[in-house]
Amino acid sequence: MNNSKKIYLDYAASTPVGEEVFKVMKPYFSEEFGNPGSLHKFGQEAMKVLDESREKASGLLGLDFENIIFTGSATEANNLVLRGIAKKINNNPEINFENPKIIVSEIEHECVLETAHDLESDGFDVAEIDVNPDGRVKLNQLEKELTEDTVIISIMYANNEIGTIQPISKISEIVQEFKKEKTNTQYPLIHSDAVQAFQFLECQPKELGLDLMTLSAHKIYGPKGVGLLANITEESLSPIITGGGQEFGLRSGTENVPLIKGLSKALEIAKEKRAEERKRMKKLSRELISGLKQIKSDIKLNGVSSQERFSSDKLKTIPNICNFYFPNNSAEELLMQLDLEGVAVSTGSACSARSAEASHVLEGLGHNPQRVNSSLRLSLGKYTTQQEIKKTISVFEKIME
Ligand code: PLP
């Protein structure tokens, strides 16, 4: 099938590289290919591009040049946060925690959840905070779980399966207050995975009260295989990849100059187009939701309800992600039928290597296995048109007859 005729509604899994992004990256693959660590002119040129990219990315996040660590993915950045903090604590005799504890939400991306639980074998306790039926974390439970042994709290800004936005500023406030009263040290640190949020929400870590924040390029029309960690608090991490000491000693390995250049351009464009895209996505998702509900009135949204979603200008969910429950339908069968009709959607999160496991996010909302297995995520993006939404609704109409 011709790809241009297909309808891609899986932008939360990955986005195509934008034209402008591709253009700025291209020369650094084969023409200006130097290693930023080399002393000759080729190396100096590469270092200049790397510095400019870092300057741009840090500026867009309201940070200083040295607050950005480029990584090979958001997965790696999230691993660096949790494992880097754990390593720092375990290797430093001056830092003493009896039962060091990591707090996460139960609907984090697998790269946070799996990593946190993996650290249990290194002596870390893990507390998972529950979410309400709309996907927002239970703040009273967070308050209860905060102890003087807590070393890091990692709560994502917007969820990749249901789109729910977490009250990050409020969470930081709770943590900062606790810190002031109880620990008077840099711990607990606070981190947020803002991979899905950046396109639609202002992501200035200092304004949000974060110590650490993760981003990924391929969710914002940049290339796959590059991410960044905004690291604001000095001396909070130990490297988990050691070698030549690149990235301020925190992530060794020759920097991928073209991808980093692409990431910084993608960040710039996403920020520039944020307000416009937010509005456009809101309109298109409203059409999609009402169109599908007209096919069968028992089709429901998972996470934030449609009334709440559109009741005020304040976003409760990022506007491109719609996760639907189709009663009496198997999500997998629907997905296959849609694919045959040229519409690409996903069940749960596609980021976890084709896992057939039930979505931990939908389970976290309290849904039974039958609802979890009858739910699909449709995520819209920059190239989604009104025409495509109409076509998608009519395809659903056809296959659900
Ligand atoms: N965090 C969230 C919220 C995501 O949606 C994804 C997507 O896969 C990731 C982390 C992982 O990103 P990456 O593919 O850059 O490792």
Image (cartoon, grey):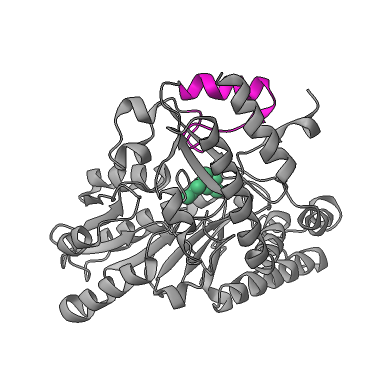
Q: Is residue 75 visible?
A: no
> Is 349 inside the magenta-drawn segment?
yes
Residue 291 x, y percent position in the rendering:
58, 39
Residue drawn at the location 68% of the way across and 52% of the way down: 221
Is the residue 114 above or below the residue 51 in the image?
above
Asked if the magenta segment contains residue 112, the reply would be no
Q: Viewed as shown, does residue 298 lie left or right of 283?
A: left
Corner quadrant of residue 269:
bottom right
Eyeballing the image, is 41 above or below 325? below
Along the horizontal axis of the image, is 169 left or right of 42? left
Q: Residue furthest right?
A: 31
Q: Quadrant of the C terminus?
A: top right
329 versus 92 height, above or below: above
Hey, which quadrant is residue 319 in on the image?
A: bottom right
Left or right: 173 with respect to 344?
Answer: left
Residue interval drawn in magenta: 330-354
Q: Quadrant of the N terminus?
A: top right
Tell me the residue at 41%/56% (across/down): 156
Q: Residue at x 59, y 60 (%)?
A: 199
Nearer to the camera, 38 or 67:
67
x 63%, y 61%: residue: 279
Q: On the rendered structure, is 58 left or right of 81?
A: right
Front one among 46 and 161: 161
Q: Nearer the viewer, residue 398 or 84?
A: 398
Q: Look at the image and tell me whether residue 294 can be seen.
A: yes
